[in-house]
Image: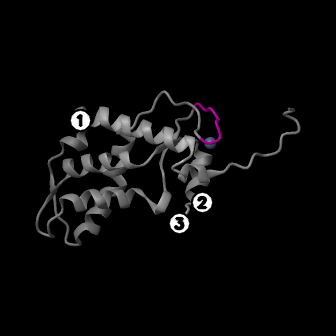
Amino acid sequence: MSLLNSSPIMLDYRILNDPESEVYMKAHQRTKNYIDNKLPRSRLKYFRNKTGLTNEDGIDGLVAHLTDNAATNCIKNFFRFNDIKECEVCGVSSDKPLDRAHCNHNGVSRPLILKRAIEHYYTDVNTPVKVNEIMRKFIELHGEMPLYMLCKKCHKEYDKKNDPS
Ligand SMILES: [Zn+2]
C-alpha cells in the first residue's frame, strides 16, 4: 500500500446510526456505563441548582431557555472521555479536543432529549420545574444512545447527513 497513491477514503457515517455496528455498540455501552457510574455521585452545579422555573410558553419555552447554555454545558462538563484521543469514525488523532456527538438516528437532537426530560416533571404552566431534576433526567436519557467522540470534520459531516429514516 502506497501513501502516494492513496485516494480520499469515503467514510460511511451510516454506521453511527446502525445499532448492529461495532462502533455503535461500543459507544453505547461506554456511554451507559459512564452514566451509571458517574451520575449518582456527580456534584456538577446543574445537579445542585434547585431553581424552579416556569415559562408562559410551557414546555417549549423551557426547552428554549435551557438548551443553549445549561444543557450544552452540562453535557460538556459531565461527559469527559479523556482517554479517547482518536476520532471514532476516521481514526484521526489530534491535539484538539474531540467533539461529543450524540447519535442523531431518528432525528434525535439535544432539544428533543431535553424536552423529554422536562415532560417527565412538567405539570402545567404555573407549576415550577426544578433545574437540578431536569438536568439529571436529561443526562440519564443519554444512556439510551451512544455518545460518539468525533473530530470536527466528521462531526460536521455526520450532522449534515442526519438520516431522517
Ligand atoms: Zn474524524
Amino acid at the residue labelled 3: Pro
Do we see residue 62 in this rendering? yes
Label 2 secondary element: loop
**Above or below 77: residue 134:** below
Q: Main secondary structure of the magenta part?
A: loop
Taking depth in this image into account, of 89 and 154 the one nearest to the observer is 89
Residue 119, labelled with which disc?
A: none
Q: Position of residue 40 (x, y in %)?
A: 23, 35
What is the residue that sits farthest to the top in this orientation?
83
| Residue drawn at point x = 61 percent, y = 42 percent | 89
Residue 164, labelled with which disc?
A: 3
Residue 40, labelled with which disc?
A: 1
92 is within the stretch colored magenta: yes
64 is within the stretch colored magenta: no
Taking depth in this image into account, of 82 and 105 the one nearest to the observer is 105
In magenta, the rendered stretch is 89-95
Q: Position of residue 23 (x, y in %)?
A: 55, 41
Amino acid at the residue labelled 2: Lys
